[in-house]
Amino acid sequence: MTYLADSLLEGAAFLAGGLLGYGVWRWKERQLLEALELRSKAITENAQRDAESITRQAKVQANEEILRIKTELEQTYAARRQELLELEQRLNHRDSLINRQLEGLVAQEKSLHEQQNQLREKEDSVVTTRHDLAVQVQACRDRLVQIAHLSEATAKEQLLREVEQQTLREAGDLSRNILDTARSKAENEARRIISVAIQRYAGDHAFETTTATITLPNEEIKGRIIGREGRNIRAFEANTGVTVLIDDTPNAVVLSSFDPVRRQIAYEAMQSLILDGRIHPTRIEEVVCKVKADIEAAIIRAGEEAVFKTGLPPMPQELVKLLGRLKFRYSFSQNILDHSIEVAHLAGMMAAELGLDVAIAKRSGLLHDIGKAVNHEVEGAHAIVGADFIKRYGENDAVVNGVASHHGEVPATFPYGVLVSAADAISASRPGARSETMTTYIKRLEDLERIGLSFNGVEKCFAVQAGRELRLMVLPDQINDEQSYSLARNVARKIEEDLQYPGQIRVTVIRETRCVEFAK
């Protein structure tokens, strides 16, 4: 019984504790709900106050923006009204101006109409007067025909013949007077004449040796040069770019190439191989490389010596190298590098006489043929090619134009082109400067005589003094003294247009009248 009573007491206590805990939990839950409700209400009230504040601020800002926009619109409308007012004033002014111009045009049109009427009346009067004059002229002609017993055509022919003869005489006299005046004023006009006249005789001639012959000590060396199945020749040609010609000519080998530098390298390499005696592809490659290095050094030394001889400041390395390459080029047996140095000195002396820049003249003269060192690589006339090349290396316009214009491919915008042209002609035409083959020489003489005989009235023609003078024998009954001067000028002009020649050619017209009578 005691155990049962204890169990009942524990169950009652546990139930009472559960009911008490439930009651406490429900109380706390109500307290929490009330707190949440109060907090929610406070948040709602704050949100309402914030919304009302934001609404008030938005209304204030909206009112300010409306006021600003209204102010801007009013200002814009005021500006537009002012512009419209000014535009209206300008239009009114333009209308008044147009009205005045229209009134002036109406007045001018009225005046022009009156002038047209006056001109028409004058034209009718002129036509009438011209008709009357034509009638009077015809009457005078008929009267002259009756008096002179000559027809109009015959009289016109005689008059034209007399006018032609008189004109020719006056032209000849004028020509002689001009020449005499030029000679009498030669001392004062020398500077202009030497710059303008002598350039007519500057011509471009290029004749280069394309082969080099090497003498062999014996015929045995030919076989060693050829090698087994021609391998030595192939190796030599591959390393030098030069064609090796071996024919039946005893003790001789010919090297052929249009490039003089390559030909010189091949020549010296072949000489070294013959002296050494060891000829095989490996040795050929070694010797050619060594000779190439020596030639390159010699080219640079030659270019530097040329610049030093002319007294010019140092030039870019590429220009010096191209100048050195000219040492291996020849024109009519004249070395082009020596010719360029000579042209530089001549141009410098003439520039000093003319009061021009001597350094620019010398520089133009030294570089005038530099295009011949690159014309196998770039197409075009050597003067144009050289001018383009030196322009890339910073040469000034006067030097570039002096090089480009010394053969007349482009006009000379500076006087240095004329000086270089004249110096080039002087250097090329001095005795012993150049030589030409017999075939070229004979062809030039034949062309000179052919040109001389192509003119009417020429009986005989002779090219004398190695082609430096052309003498024309004319028929005296067809060519008079005045016409002889014109014939000489025309022949000289024809030679300049058709032929290329170094120096100058004198044209001499000889007119001889022989009167023969017999005394019986």
Image: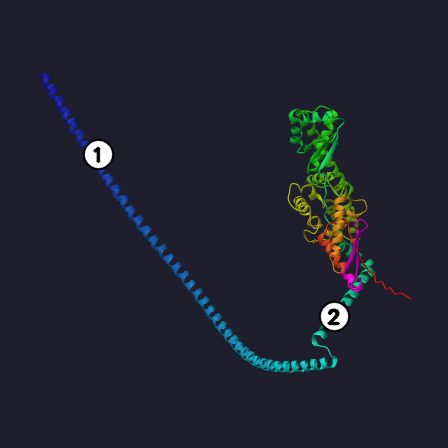
Asked whether 420 or 162 is in front, the reply is 162
Verify whether residue 139 appears in magenta.
no
* Tag shown at residue 54: none
In the image, farthest residue toward the left: 1
Q: Is residue 323 left or right of residue 182?
A: left
- Per the rendered image, the range of residues in magenta is 457-486
Which type of secondary structure does the marked residue at label 2 adopt?
helix
Tell me how many marks there are.
Answer: 2
The answer to whether any part of residue 5 appears in the image is yes
Which residue does the numbered mark 2 point to in the structure image?
161
Is 143 placed above or below 224 here?
below
Q: The N terminus lies in which quarter of the figure?
A: top left
Which type of secondary structure does the marked residue at label 1 adopt?
helix
Residue 187, quarter of picture: bottom right
Which residue does the numbered mark 1 point to in the structure image?
28
Residue drawn at x 51%, y 73% is 97
Whole-percent x, y for residue 214 in the image: 74, 31
Crowdedness of circle 2 by 10 Å Cα count: few (<14), some, many (20+)? Answer: few
